[in-house]
Amino acid sequence: MSEVNTSSIPTLPPAMDSLPHARNSAALSVVAAGLGQLYNRQWGKGFILLAMYALGLYFAITRLGHALWGLTTLGEQKQQMKLVGKVYQPIAGDHSIFLMVQGLIVLFVVFLLVLLYAASIRDAYRIGKLREQGIAPKPFIETLKFVNDKWFPYMILSAPLLFVLFFTVLPIVFSILIAFTDYSSPNHLPPANLVNWVGITNFLDLFQLSAWAKTFYGVFTWTITWAVLSTVTTFFGGFAIALLVQQKFVRFKSFWRTLYMLPFAIPSFVSLLIMRNFFNTQFGPVNQYLRWFGIEGPEWLADPFWAKVTVLIVNFWLGFPISMLLIMGILTTIPREQYEAAEVDGASPIQRFRMITFPSVMYSLAPILIGTFAGNVNNFGVIFLLTGGNPANSEYQFAGETDLLITWLYKLSITNGKYNFASVISIMIFVIIAGLSIWNFRRTKAFKEEETYR
């Protein structure tokens, strides 16, 4: 009998053929988190994951169904008054908002448990592959030491991350969901009434109903105008003062820097309340001083035009010191050799400013300038404390002439209980700020150069 040549027959690696630990441990972890680790003889880790899996499974079984029911229905029974004997007593009903919040919390917890479940499967598969390579799994104490050495930063960051998820992301999701409901007073306030899902009706009403649309477009136009003018005035005002203070012929530079930083050092709400009385039409010092010169001052806070001028002036007074301070810091980093070379080449002061100073400052401050613009869109304090959004506009819905989107949102929610429309406005603010900020930031020279060096 001739011998068969088996050298050409492919064979599986011995580890994969006889020790399919990776496949088995992963399959066991799919059944229950921790079983794969127990299979890999990681007893401590396996029992901990198994206990967490059991608790998570119990939590999901007992809570997930009610959470989904609450999110989809927002309740079915409203609070009622029932005659008990001769006295009417309130019978508790479903609280739509509580059901929504509880449902979101349960979904977030289940999402985290699913991530833990997936991580346990991946870990079991990885340890199984190491066993197939002849590497013994580390004992539980060694695993803890490894985690402490290599994953310590992630462990420290995990707690703030959970806070961000539950106290930032969850409220954002909640506010977005409110925009698709009829949650408003007095007809849809729980527990006396139920809240219902209405789809995109609130968005359509904001743009189609004449009263709401006129208010939105008017407030939106003023918000963008305010953000642009307040950003430009504070930035270039601080720029001009920084250049003047840095000139060689200016003496007592430290005194001028300190003097111009005083508006920033005083708490803004104190300055705003003082300015509110300062520009009072009847008793304010501004109009009193003007009357001494025979000039009748305008109604600073009562006239629509002058009210807008006033908030811009006050915001400039409060905002230019920080721009001045930042620009002074940048000016000190520009090499003097550049200015000296420009002077030798015959460049005028304006040319030196245009070719050296301004590009250097804008390269460093362009991202901050974009952030300042976004902050001015949401500059609640200046408007609320100085004018309160007034003077009133009879054609607007719950808004005044100087109201920004953020102060209008406050009036809609806190003052008038129109939570659904307030949520729509908050979504619009996010879209506007995020869109404009990302678009402008990607056009900055700093961002383009960062992309080039990657």
Image (cartoon, rainbow, N blue to C red):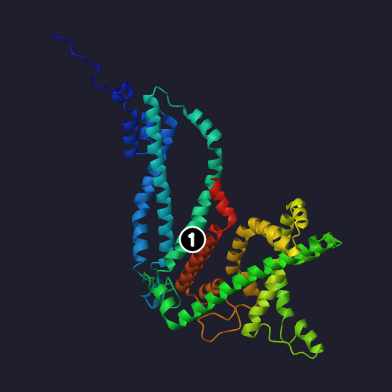
| Residue situated furthest right in the rendering | 251
Q: Quadrant of residue 49?
A: top left
Is residue 40 something that shows in the picture? no
Between 35 and 401, the one lying in front of the other is: 401
| Residue situated furthest front in the rendering | 345
Is residue 388 something that shows in the picture? yes
Q: Position of residue 181 (x, y in %)?
A: 40, 70
Q: Position of residue 454 (x, y in %)?
A: 53, 45
Q: Quadrant of residue 265?
A: bottom right
Residue 244 falls left or right of residue 77: right
Residue 44 falls left or right of residue 132: right
Q: Position of residue 231 (x, y in %)?
A: 64, 68
Residue 439 falls left or right of residue 229: left
In what quadrant of the picture does the N terminus appear?
A: top left
| Residue situated furthest top in the rendering | 1
Mark 1 falls on what kind of element?
Answer: helix
Q: Residue under label 1, please give it.
A: 171
At 71% from the left and 86% from the top, the residue drawn is 281
How many callouts does the rendering have? 1
Q: Residues within 10 Å of mark 1 (few under 14, many from 20)?
A: some
Between 280 and 341, the one lying in front of the other is: 341
Which three-letter amino acid code belongs to the residue tagged 1? Pro
| 143 vs 159: above or below | above
Residue 213 falls left or right of residue 261: left
| Residue situated furthest left in the rendering | 1
Q: Quadrant of residue 83?
A: bottom left
At 80% from the left and 65% from the top, the residue drawn is 259
Q: Position of residue 158 (x, y in %)?
A: 52, 45
